């Protein structure tokens, strides 16, 4: 069963609609993007009710911001890993530590703005465990794999094609980085690298970051080797 992958840009964030027999959405973008998402669905010819699951790669505001509204629009349950799950359920905005000097600059610039934004408290329906989650029951051949490091509860989605939707486990391009590589914000970079290894061992071929363009997984393999 092939999986069709459509990139849906909600604010600064690449979200992904996966379609097999059913549809699974990966991430929901910044707050206030449910209407934009509805227009994307209409353009793709997908009924909101066709979305059977919403997978949250992690609990940051630019990924989970529209979760509540998109859950209401689609009726789909939200799947997420602890402890990020609690952030969303409490409406908690968490800023990750910067891992580069440029990351620190960007964080300082956006911190005053971040205090103005609120994350809506959102019920999370499904907790993703240590074994991850098989997406087949939701109509998509693919797996959710725990890849902590950017946040403690970060996950990636790996498809049989080798397409890996990694959230912020890697970042690519302006204004974050000059090229693909480590996230410029992360709780634990060693864990991030371990997550890269996990994905490579599981057959990842193309990395789709939430920020920036997709790139070959070999970039990660080479970075780990140096
Ligand atoms: Zn993030």
Image: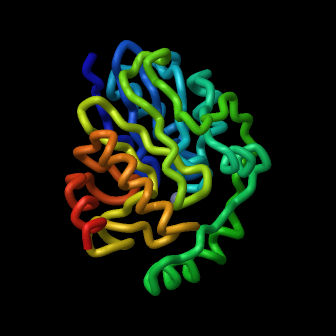
Residue 131 can be seen in this image: yes
Where, quadrant-wise, is the C terminus in this rendering? bottom left
In the picture, measured across the screen, residue 156 lies left or right of residue 181, that is: right
Q: Which image quadrant is residue 188 in?
A: bottom right
Up/down of 189 relative to 57, above or below: below
Compare residues 217 and 22 and report the one nearer the observer.
Answer: 217
Compare residues 70 and 22 and report the one nearer the observer.
Answer: 22
Q: Residue shown at 60%/33% (left/top)?
A: 79
Q: How many marks?
A: 0
Q: Residue shown at 46%/86% (left/top)?
A: 101
Q: Residue shown at 33%/73% (left/top)?
A: 177
Residue 190: horizontal and vertical position, in percent?
48, 67
Residue 200: horizontal and vertical position, in percent?
30, 48
In the picture, measured across the screen, residue 174 lies left or right of residue 28, that is: left
Rendered image coloring scheme: rainbow
In the picture, measured across the screen, residue 21 lies left or right of residue 213, that is: right
Up/down of 157 relative to 192, above or below: above
Up/down of 165 relative to 143, above or below: below
Q: Residue shown at 61%/32% (left/top)?
A: 78
The residue at the far right in this view is 90
Residue 12 can be seen in this image: no
């Amino acid at each position: 069963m092939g999986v069709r992958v459509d990139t849906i840009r909600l604010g600064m964030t690449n979200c992904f609609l996966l379609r097999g027999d059913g549809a699974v959405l990966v991430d929901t973008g910044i707050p206030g993007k449910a209407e934009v998402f509805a227009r994307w669905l209409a353009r793709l010819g997908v009924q909101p009710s066709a979305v059977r699951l919403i997978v949250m790669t992690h609990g940051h505001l630019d990924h989970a911001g529209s979760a509540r509204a998109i859950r209401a629009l689609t009726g789909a349950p939200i799947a997420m890993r602890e402890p990020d799950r609690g952030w969303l359920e409490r409406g908690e905005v968490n800023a990750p530590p910067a891992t580069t000097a440029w990351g620190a600059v960007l964080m300082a610039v956006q911190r005053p703005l971040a205090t103005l934004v609120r994350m809506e408290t959102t019920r999370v329906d499904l907790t993703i465990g240590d074994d991850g989650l098989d997406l087949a029951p939701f109509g998509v051949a693919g797996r959710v794999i725990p890849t902590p490091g950017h946040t403690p509860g970060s996950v990636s989605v790996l498809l049989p094609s080798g397409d890996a939707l990694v959230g912020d486990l890697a970042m690519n391009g302006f204004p974050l980085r000059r090229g693909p590589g480590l996230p410029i914000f992360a709780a634990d970079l060693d864990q991030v690298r371990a997550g890269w290894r996990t994905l490579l061992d599981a057959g990842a071929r193309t990395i789709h970051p939430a920020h920036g363009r997709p790139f070959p997984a070999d970039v990660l393999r080479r970075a780990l080797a140096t």
